Image (cartoon, rainbow, N blue to C red):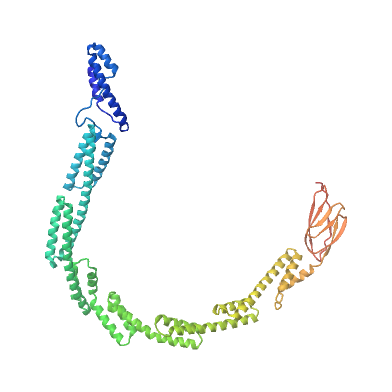
């Protein structure tokens, strides 16, 4: 029973868990154990003569028995080392995780191509072998196997990339072959060579020779280019024939030619447009002939209408477009003389705005015509001088009529037309000052009226006098100003006011005079609103408001402090 337990314990202890951080301590411990084992072995020989109980006790005392692990001689005698370097379980696990991730990625992008499936099977088989080695604690061999699998995964990625590129070129080849099939009659040899190269590339692609298949498909595309060139030469000749039939108005022949082109190139936009134009080519040619005759007969307006109809039927017709442009230019040229005559007539009438407008229109119509720029500049200068003269005359007339704002605006107009005009500058300063004086005068009168309405007659008198001091001499007083003047004249004289007190109260008029202590006193006060204050020590102040007006009996004003504070 005891030996059985020891055997089972010995098996469990053969699983060695390495600690990469403790390599140096482990080496020293192993060396020490081996030395101790030798000493203990000699001791065992000497103690053979002892009893079994003594031998067992000695071995137990020295720590021998199942606790010592004897290294195995051979390739696996030093597990966890590779070329003298330690390989840990953690390092192998990291490598395994990276490889497993790579296998998962290529498994997702691997399709049903036999070559790719075969490579994937090889990779997964090698990965399984690495897993078995890892499970048996052969870390060094497992690490080597996983590194091998990693290289296989990278090669697999490159193979998948090559396959995708080959598939892309293969699809381009199939599309080109289908597109150029209708052109094979123009270059049959090149077309057959392209098909042969394509078949060879297809076989290599299916066998997994992706790089070689790409070369075959590219060679096939080169041959198809030759087929397209031959077809384009044929189409170019047909287009020339179609244009000739177009110019003659041969509707049936034009339709046939462009239909043949579309048979070879269904996406040929030029052929599509020309086939659509061919449907109305007979009507177009008829209109062009009619328009040309009208133009030659001098009916430019009628020719323009006919050319525009032709251009509306076929907007790509060069003859119709050129006819519209040419006739419009001739019409404009004929209208040019009319513009010149109208400008001269307006100039003779001194209607400068009409003359300038006419010359500007003529200049825009014929910008390269010599003389027009000079005539336009001359008329503009004459018009400017005439406007300066007119504005100056109006300014002086307004000034004589004392219309200062209108005169000022007219002087400004002169300066806009003739910058630096001395007379206009002086007139603007003069009228500007007078306008400001009038504004100030009106403001002062309004302020004086407002103060008078509030009973502030003395302030109103001062403001009114200030306004009268700046009033222009030619300007009469209006009725409202005269009424204000009369009222202020009446309220400019002092009015006697009688005050009664107790002789102990100090009486004062705010902003006017200290009356002092008295029992009865008369003060001459100018009309206005005043506040009378009475003060006495130990008593509350008394405050009265009086309104003094000329011509009004005011009565007695009693000012006595009677309430104790």
Residue 561 locus on image (x, y percent): 83, 51
- The answer to whether 245 appears left or right of 382 in the picture is left
Q: Work out whether 391 lies above or below 18.
A: below
Q: Work out whether 206 lies above or below 258.
A: above
**Residue 1 visible in rendering:** no
Considering every residue shown, the one lying at the far top of the view is 51
Give the residue at x 23% y 76%. 281
Residue 509 locus on image (x, y percent): 80, 58
For the N terminus, the quadrant is: top left
Q: Quadrant of residue 425?
A: bottom right
Task: From the viewer's side, name the closer residue of 86 and 224.
Answer: 86
Task: From the viewer's side, name the closer residue of 197 and 276.
Answer: 197
Residue 196 locus on image (x, y percent): 12, 59
Q: Work out whether 52 lies above or below 387.
A: above
Task: From the viewer's side, name the closer residue of 407 and 291.
Answer: 407
Residue 142 locus on image (x, y percent): 23, 36
**Residue 417 visible in rendering:** yes
Q: Quadrant of residue 269?
A: bottom left
Q: Work out whether 127 lies above or below 412.
A: above
- The answer to whether 481 appears left or right of 425 in the picture is right
Give the residue at x 44% y 88%. 341
Number of residue marks: 0
């Amino acid at each position: 029973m005891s030996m059985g337990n020891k055997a089972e314990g010995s098996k469990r202890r053969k699983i060695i868990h390495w600690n990469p951080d403790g390599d140096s301590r482990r080496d020293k411990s192993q060396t020490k154990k081996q030395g101790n084992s030798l000493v203990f072995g000699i001791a065992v020989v000497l103690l053979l003569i002892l009893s079994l109980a003594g031998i067992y006790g000695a071995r137990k005392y020295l720590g021998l028995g199942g606790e010592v692990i004897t290294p195995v001689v051979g390739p696996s005698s030093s597990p966890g080392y590779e070329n003298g370097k330690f390989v840990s379980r953690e390092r192998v696990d990291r490598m395994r995780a990276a490889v497993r991730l790579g296998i998962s990625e290529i498994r997702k992008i691997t399709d049903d191509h036999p070559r790719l499936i075969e490579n994937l099977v090889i990779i997964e088989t090698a990965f399984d072998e690495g897993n078995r080695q890892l499970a048996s604690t052969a870390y060094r061999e497992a690490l080597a196997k996983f590194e091998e699998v990693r290289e296989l995964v990278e090669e697999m990625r490159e193979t998948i990339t090559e396959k995708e590129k080959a598939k892309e070129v293969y699809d381009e080849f199939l599309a080109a072959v289908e597109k150029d099939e209708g052109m094979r009659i123009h270059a049959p040899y090149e077309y057959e060579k392209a098909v042969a190269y394509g078949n060879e590339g297809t076989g290599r692609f299916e066998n997994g020779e992706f790089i070689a298949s790409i070369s075959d498909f590219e060679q096939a595309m080169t041959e198809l280019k030759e087929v397209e060139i031959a077809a384009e030469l044929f189409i170019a000749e047909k287009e020339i024939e179609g244009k000739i039939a177009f110019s003659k108005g041969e509707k049936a022949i034009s339709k046939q030619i462009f239909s043949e082109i579309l048979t070879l190139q269904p996406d040929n936009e030029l052929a599509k447009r020309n086939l659509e134009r061919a449907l109305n080519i007979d009507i177009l040619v008829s209109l062009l002939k009619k328009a040309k005759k009208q133009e030659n007969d001098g009916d430019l307006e009628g020719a323009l209408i006919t050319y525009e109809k032709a251009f509306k039927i076929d907007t790509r017709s060069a003859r119709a477009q050129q006819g519209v442009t040419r006739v419009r230019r001739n019409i404009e040229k004929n209208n040019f003389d009319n513009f010149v005559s109208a400008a001269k007539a307006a100039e003779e009438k001194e209607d400068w705005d009409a003359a300038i407008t006419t010359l500007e229109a003529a200049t825009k119509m014929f910008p390269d015509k010599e003389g027009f720029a000079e005539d336009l500049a001359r008329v503009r200068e004459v018009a400017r001088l005439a406007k300066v003269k007119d504005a100056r005359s109006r300014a002086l007339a307004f000034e004589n009529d004392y219309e200062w704002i209108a005169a000022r605006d007219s002087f400004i107009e002169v300066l806009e037309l003739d910058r630096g005009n001395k007379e206009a500058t002086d007139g603007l300063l003069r009228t500007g000052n007078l306008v400001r004086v009038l504004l100030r005068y009106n403001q002062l009168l309004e302020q004086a009226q407002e103060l008078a309405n509030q009973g502030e007659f003395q302030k109103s008198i001062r403001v009114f006098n200030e306004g009268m001091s700046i009033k222009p001499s030619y300007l009469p007083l209006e009725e409202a100003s005269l009424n204000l003047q009369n009222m202020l004249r009446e309220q400019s004289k002092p009015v006697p006011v009688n005050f009664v007190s107790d002789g102990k109260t100090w009486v004062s008029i705010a902003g006017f005079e200290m009356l002092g202590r008295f029992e009865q006193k008369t003060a001459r006060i100018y009309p206005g609103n005043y506040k009378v204050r009475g003060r006495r020590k130990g008593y509350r102040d008394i405050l009265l408001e009086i309104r003094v007006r000329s011509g009004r009996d005011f009565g007695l004003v009693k000012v006595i402090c009677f309430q104790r504070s």
